[in-house]
Amino acid sequence: TRMDLCLLAEDCSAPNWDGFGARPVRHDTYVNAYRVLDGLPLGIKLPTIGADPDGEITLEWHVTARRTLSLSVTEDGLLHYAALIGPNKAYGTEAFLGELPRTIADLIQRIQMA
């Protein structure tokens, strides 16, 4: 997955990488996403990695339509998240300060254990 992240960041590093005006994925965004992946607890299923047209990197854990989490990593170290766990929804923003915020770690575990 770290290699996927590296290739994605390289493929999306130029302006308009999608042909529809997408902003480039900046080096700091890549570094933050790499550090998030590095900080995942052992035994956690690795996410699917993608890039958003706004230049953010998205990490997604999708188990079923009702057990899913999307995490967008920004250049300035913010983690925007949205989760659906059964009938429950959770969303918000957490600062990434070198360690995966407890809120997001709990959501990842709930997605995989629900």
Image (tube, rainbow, N blue to C red):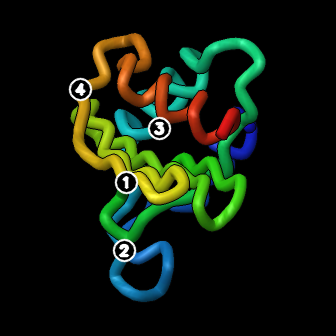
What label sits on residue 95 in the rendered view? 4
Q: Amino acid at mark 3?
A: Tyr
Spot occupied by residue 58 in the image (x, y as percentages of width and height): 49, 52
Percent from the top left, x then y, of residue 20?
40, 87
Question: Residue 46: x percent and y percent?
Answer: 71, 36
Q: In this figure, what is the number of numbered marks?
A: 4
| Of the two numbered discs 1 and 2 in the rendering, the one whose residue sits closer to the viewer | 1
Mark 4, Cα crowd under 10 Å, few <14 / some 14-19 / many 20+, is some
Residue 19, horizontal then vertical, whole percent = 47, 86
Distance in Å between CA atoms under marks 1 and 2: 28 Å
Please tell me which residue is depicted at 71% across the width and 53% down the height of the picture. 63
**Sequence-wise, which precedes: disc 2 or disc 3?**
2
- Which residue is at a point 74% across and 38% down the rendered structure image? 1
Q: Which labelled disc corresponds to residue 30?
A: 3
What type is the residue that disc 4 sits on? Ala
Residues 59 and 15: in front is 59
Residue wearing tag 1: 89
Q: For residue 27, what is the image quadrant?
A: top left
